[in-house]
Image: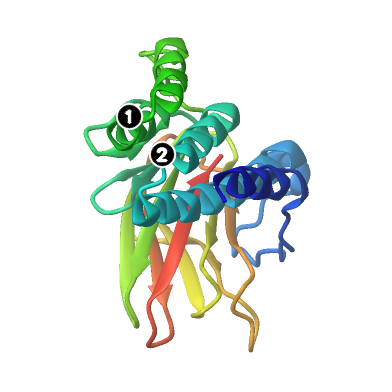
Amino acid sequence: MRRSISRLVALGLVFGSAAIAPASALIPVAEADIGTDEAGDAAKRIETAALVRDLVAWARAQEDPEALIVAAQILANSNIVLAAADDATLEIGQVEREDFPIIEPLTLLAEARVLADDDPDILQRILDMIASESKGFLPQAIVYTHDLKGSGRLVMRARAEGGRPALVRVRGDGDARLEMVVRDEAGREVCRDAPGRGERGADLVCRWTPTSTGNYRLELLNRDRVWTRTLVVSN
């Protein structure tokens, strides 16, 4: 069973994809300005984060150290970490260590080590991976997770560099209609995205180019009465 889980995860990384719907920002930025590579990277990061999030939840429920090892490998290879969106600052353009908990390869390997104490082969694999992990690891991106209650609102602070195109992508689990709004320090709306009528599964995307470096406020709104699991990532 554990081998089957590892194979399914590998296949999911190779073949997994999602249809991405275009955003309707009030202050649009040309795709060429953002860069199709950056836009595609944001989509891939969310796809990978969703896979890792679900795999970690399954591994913890089943107390399966090998599944945690696979999740750690995926994070390391993808150069991302997961963090709870609550009280976290959305990083745009750069990622630095923050004072909030993150799920990174070393934390998952530490969990796996506790579960594998009666299996010397698995324990040795974990110790080898821990030894090879860089203690000063800085990820390319943080993917933020949040369980948004029905009719709820998530507010995140963000800081963006002047003259550099900024991109934020949000994905829900498809159970609820989400809406994203970005405002500047003066409260002016710089971007808004919401799905079309009847749509629930499409990503929300906001793109804008700040004229100067400043702080922004991102609001994610749940327009339905059921809770939904959400993922947020920036370029």
Of the pair 58 and 204, the residue shown nearer to us:
58
- Amino acid type indicated by mark 2: Pro
CB-based contact (under 8 Å), mark 2 and mark 1: yes
Which residue is identified by label 1? 113
Q: Residue at x 51, y 79 (%)?
A: 175
Q: Residues within 10 Å of mark 1 (few under 14, many from 20)?
A: many
Question: With 159 as the anchor, is 202 left or right in this view?
Answer: right
Residue 96 seen in render: yes
Of the pair 175 and 212, the residue shown nearer to us:
175
In x, y percent, where is residue 65? 41, 39
Q: Is residue 122 above or below residue 194?
A: above
Question: With 12 as the anchor, is 158 left or right in this view?
Answer: left
Q: Is residue 184 above or below residue 148?
A: above
Which one is earlier in the sequence, the residue at label 2 or at label 1?
2
Of the pair 46 and 204, the residue shown nearer to us:
46
In x, y percent, where is residue 168? 53, 51
Residue 168 seen in render: no
- Amino acid type indicated by mark 1: Arg
Residue 235, quarter of the rendered image: top right
Q: Residue at x 42, y 29 (%)?
A: 105
Residue 96, quarter of the rendered image: top left
Spatial separation of the CA atoms under disc 2 and disc 1? 7 Å
Q: Residue at x 66, y 40 (%)?
A: 41
| Element carrying mark 2 | helix
Mark linked to residue 65: 2
In x, y percent, where is residue 148? 35, 70
Total number of numbered discs in the rendering: 2
Q: Residue at x 64, y 69 (%)?
A: 202
Of the pair 46 and 7, the residue shown nearer to us:
7
| Element carrying mark 1 | helix
Q: Residues within 10 Å of mark 2 (few under 14, many from 20)?
A: many
